[in-house]
Image (tube, grey):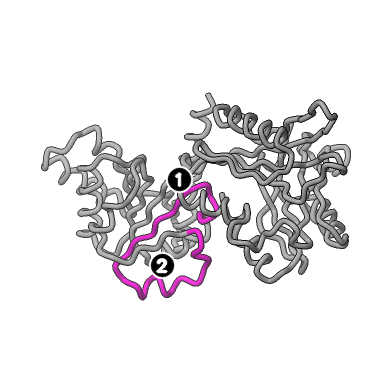
Amino acid sequence: MDSWLDPVKTEISLNNGFVLLTIIATKGSTPCRNGDKIVFTKNENSFGSIGGGNLEFKSLAFAKEMLGQKMNTRQLVKYPLGATLGQCCGGYVKVLFESFIDDDEGLSHNNSWIEQVSALYKKGEDFILATIIDIDKKNHSSTQKCIYTNNNFYSSLGNKKLSNFIEESASNLMQSAQSPTIVEFEDDSETKAQVLLEKVNSSEVLPVVVFGAGHISRALMPIIINLPIKLYWIDDRQEQFDQYVGDTSQINIICDDFLTSMADLPNEIYTLVITYSHQIDFEICEKMIIQNNFSYLGMIGSSIKGRKFRDRFAQKNYSKDVIDKFTCPIGEKQKLLKSPTSIAITIAMDLINFIENKKQSELS
């Protein structure tokens, strides 16, 4: 969800120009969703995706053109997927392009909007990121971003009326399911502005914990790291973590006793038990069942292992309703493909389906 922040921070630290692409509107069948982002760098590296295909190809070509200019610019482009791009989807998307070529917005400062957004993600706090897309040149302000939370409003705009308008609009959006949205501003002096409001529901991101850092878990991490989740990875063996060579910037790695580490996990957590010991598996699952504060509890293993664990839980008189929420085996068993990657992909599909069903139920 916040995977675009790291490449942005890297480019800022290197004093390199980049373009931030954001999908702000979709209609019909599209390969992307509102809020999807790409970071395209001066070195022509791209991070993230807006659905691939000709849409992404044309968008990156346009981003490259923007990097050839001498000043920061923002442009809103509408792409009809069928007529213009020859994609069979048939819908259209609007893409906001923001180029950051010079640091007139103070991105390298400790109190920049990038640092504030990063801190809000880490705290799991909901917020609105407001971007001024278009404003009268005579009233142009170099600082084009504002941030609204339920407790604070961060703005350094010189136009007080515009600042108040953005704060009020952001407050209204925070209570709405719609995002992103564009609002129009005009005051008595005929100052006009278009403002994009993006709502980030950090508090609604699904917490996920993976117990065990063996070969299957290490294969699982790069598959799920960029899903809309807050990821915890627990094992009591540092050497297992050391064998993982992938990106860990989005992972809360905890090298400690399994049961002790459970105390600080959030409620309603999606739990995957993939440790090296059946006894440890049982102790983790038993504690989860006693606490009954999980949204999903799944353990790797055979159907026989799952049945034996359920029998042991029942013998201890734990709630049948809670025991029934326990899943083992997890993933989908394959007859021939049994590599760690194959197993990890099926486990990841369970997680993806869980997130999809949860989001659809919230919209209905």
Nearest the eye: 225 or 301: 225
Q: Is residue 232 above or below residue 125?
A: below
Q: Who's the residue at 60% across and 38% down the image?
A: 199
Give the residue number, with chain letter if any, for mark 2: 215
User: Which of marks 1 and 2 precedes in the sequence?
Assistant: 2
Residue appearing at x 87%, y 42% in the figure: 138
Label 1: which secondary element: helix
Considering depth in this image, is 47 or 345 the residue closer to the camera?
47
Q: Nearer the viewer, residue 319 or 262?
A: 262
Q: Quadrant of residue 194?
A: top right
Residue type at mark 2 is His
Name the mark on residue 350.
1
Whole-percent x, y for residue 130 in the image:
67, 41
- Visible in this render: residue 339? no
Q: Quadrant of residue 12?
A: bottom right
Name the image quarter holding residue 92.
Answer: top right
Residue 46, compared with residue 23, is above or below; it is below
Q: Which residues are magenta?
A: 224-250
* Amino acid tagged 1: Asp
Magenta span includes 244: yes
Up/down of 97 relative to 160, above or below: below
- Judge the density around disc 2: few (<14), some (14-19), many (≥20) Cα neighbours within 10 Å: some
